[in-house]
Image (spheres, helix red, strand yellow):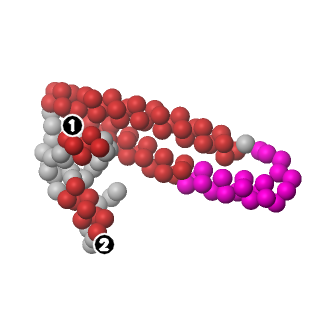
Amino acid sequence: MPTITRSGRSKKFTVLEKQLASQRNELRLRIDRHRMDAVSDRDLDDEAAAAVENATKDMLAVTLERERRTLNEVELALTRLKKGEYGVCDHCGTEIPKARLEALPWARLCVHCAERATNSKSFRVSL
């Protein structure tokens, strides 16, 4: 699998690395806020209020899980940057186009492999 040297990486991906670090920090803050919201105790005295509270907590749990997965992808991208493996498809080893990385900075697959992973049950990549 081709890798990009540290000096090449620093020039080519500096902006994306800063963007990923910023996203990581923002996600960490949002996750902490969501956790605080989830544990706040409220005295609910009617069924409607309890139902709204339960629905809100369910939506919060889904949001929290999505943000945790995104945070994990961002952290993996930062690790790949440090190793000089960023911007290379995990499946086929081709360079991921800059436009894709700008749109999805934590992308691990090129567009072709991502489409195959989405449309094929036989395609195996740890996402």
The C terminus sits in image quarter: bottom left
Residue at image x 24%, y 46%?
100
Residue placed under numbered mark 2 in the picture: 121
Relative to 106, 36 lies left or right: right
Q: Residues within 10 Å of mark 2 (few under 14, many from 20)?
A: few
Q: Amino acid at mark 1?
A: Gly
| Residue at the outermost bottom position | 121
Does the rendering let one see residue 96? yes
The image shows a total of numbered marks equal to 2
Judging from the image, what secondary structure is the residue with disc 2 in? loop
Using the rendered view, name the quadrant where residue 85 is placed. Answer: top left
Placement of 40 over or under 6, stated as above or below: below
Residue at image x 33%, y 58%?
126
Residue at image x 37%, y 41%?
74
Placement of 2 over or under 6, stated as above or below: below
Residue at image x 60%, y 54%?
59
Residue placed under numbered mark 1 in the picture: 84
Relative to 52, 118 lies left or right: left
| Residue at the outermost front position | 48
Observer-side mark, 2 or 1, equals 2
* Mark 2 in CB contact with mark 1 (< 8 angstroms): no
Q: In the rendered structure, does residue 56 fall within the stretch colored magenta?
A: yes
Q: Residues within 10 Å of mark 1 (few under 14, many from 20)?
A: some
Give x and y (percent) for residue 7: 16, 27
**Magenta-highlighted stretch: main secondary structure?**
helix
Q: Amino acid at mark 2?
A: Lys
Query: Magenta region: which residues?
Result: 41-62
Using the rendered view, name the quadrant where residue 23 is placed. Answer: top left
Give x and y (percent) for residue 89: 21, 51
